[in-house]
Image (cartoon, rainbow, N blue to C red):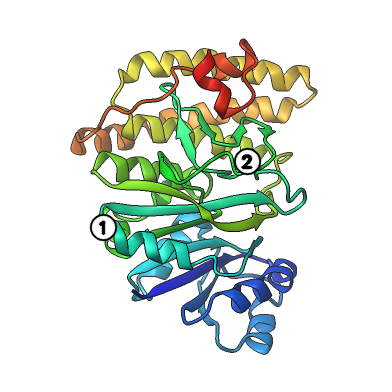
Amino acid sequence: MKLSVIILNWNGENLLKRYLPSVVKFTNNFDIYLVDNNSEDNSIIFTKNNFPNINIIKLSKNYGYAEGYNIAIKQIESDIYCFLNSDVRVTENWTKPIIKIFKNNPSITIIQPKILDEKKPEKFEYSGAAGGFIDKLGYPYCRGRIFNTTEIDKNQYHDREIFWASGACFFVRSKNFKDLGGFDTNFFAHMEEIDFCWRNYNHGGITYYTNSSKVYHLGGQSLKSSNPKKTFLNFRNNLLTITKNTPNPLLLIIICRLFLDGLAGIKFLLEGKPNHMLSILRAHQSYYKNLFLVLKFRYNNKTRKMYNSEFSIVLKYYVFRVKSFVNLIKH
């Protein structure tokens, strides 16, 4: 089974210096690709000089996460793609359990390893933790992370099916990735992996988490949480994802989201972050501008399966003060 590890890069020379050595050291017998989104630093020169065996695909401009990967995979022949952020440190034998699961379980199409925090290695990392889920209103959460609260890793989360895998590091069968049309390029960045996994679920694919593979993610390197653009992309892309994929009554969900996103805007304002509040407004404006296209997708793709999830993780977290995944079933 051929595996290709694909790292998307944009002006990440310092990250490549820090994290590429672990990828090269612990990714034996598999191809590694650096896909460069037209960086202005010395990322390519550094990689060529220090890791000549890494394959380099240079793109003509910064296409973002979604389209950058979509373009790259057209040039890569493999059975399994691993999409790996440039700020991820991998560990010894990290690919072995992944390959074994794929070989033994043909119905599993996507796999995520355990993602821990590079800055606080004892804790799960925000982006994916021990596998993602989504509530009925479209808010994502993880085993090991609900909103901004992350748990200490005590091996409490074992191998099982999940709803979505983190774009920081996930493995996918190449055939399934291509059959589903890859990532939605309208997203540019943020939540495109959730949209992809949701489409995968609706078409009968299984997304899986394994505790036997472990990586460490620095996080927040492409866009800091303090950047209003990140708020814009997260809120806008979340609405696009829901509209495309949810099996639940769409109009009711959008009305609920208008109310809850409005509360989020007020929260940002009270925290002294008016630019983030404005980003939510812009996110909704952009969503309605693109509504015809996403409704067209929804109409043409009527396979939408029901899934078991919380009604509102917002209610559980902010009202009932549930801060960990293991406590959700108690409320």
Q: Which mark is residue 240?
A: none
Question: How many other residues sit within 10 Å of disc 1, few (<14), some (14-19) or many (≥20)?
Answer: few
Q: Nearer the viewer, residue 146 or 40?
A: 146
Which residue, given by chain and number where applicable, does mark 2 sit on? 230
At x 41% / y 72%, what residue is drawn?
3
Which badge, 2 or 1, is on the more N-terminal residue?
1
Determine whether the residue tagged by mark 2 lies in a helix, strand or loop: helix
Q: Is residue 110 above or below residue 90?
A: above
Q: Position of residue 278 (x, y in %)?
A: 65, 27
Image quadrant holding the N terminus, namely bottom left
- The span from disc 2 to disc 1 (Cα, nearest Å) is 36 Å
At x 55% / y 87%, what residue is drawn?
53
Left or right, 112 with respect to 325, comes to left
* Amino acid at dot 1: Pro
Q: Nearer the viewer, residue 166 or 93?
A: 93
Q: Is residue 203 above or below residue 46?
A: above
Q: Is residue 127 above or below residue 4?
A: above
Q: Position of residue 154 (x, y in %)?
A: 65, 41
Q: Which mark is residue 106?
A: 1
* Amino acid at dot 2: Lys
Q: Position of residue 174 (x, y in %)?
A: 32, 64
Determine whether the residue tagged by mark 1 lies in a helix, strand or loop: loop
At x 67% / y 36%, what residue is drawn?
151
Question: How many other residues sit within 10 Å of disc 2, few (<14), some (14-19) or many (≥20)?
Answer: some
- Which quadrant of the figure has residue 324? top right
Q: Nearer the viewer, residue 324 or 268?
A: 324
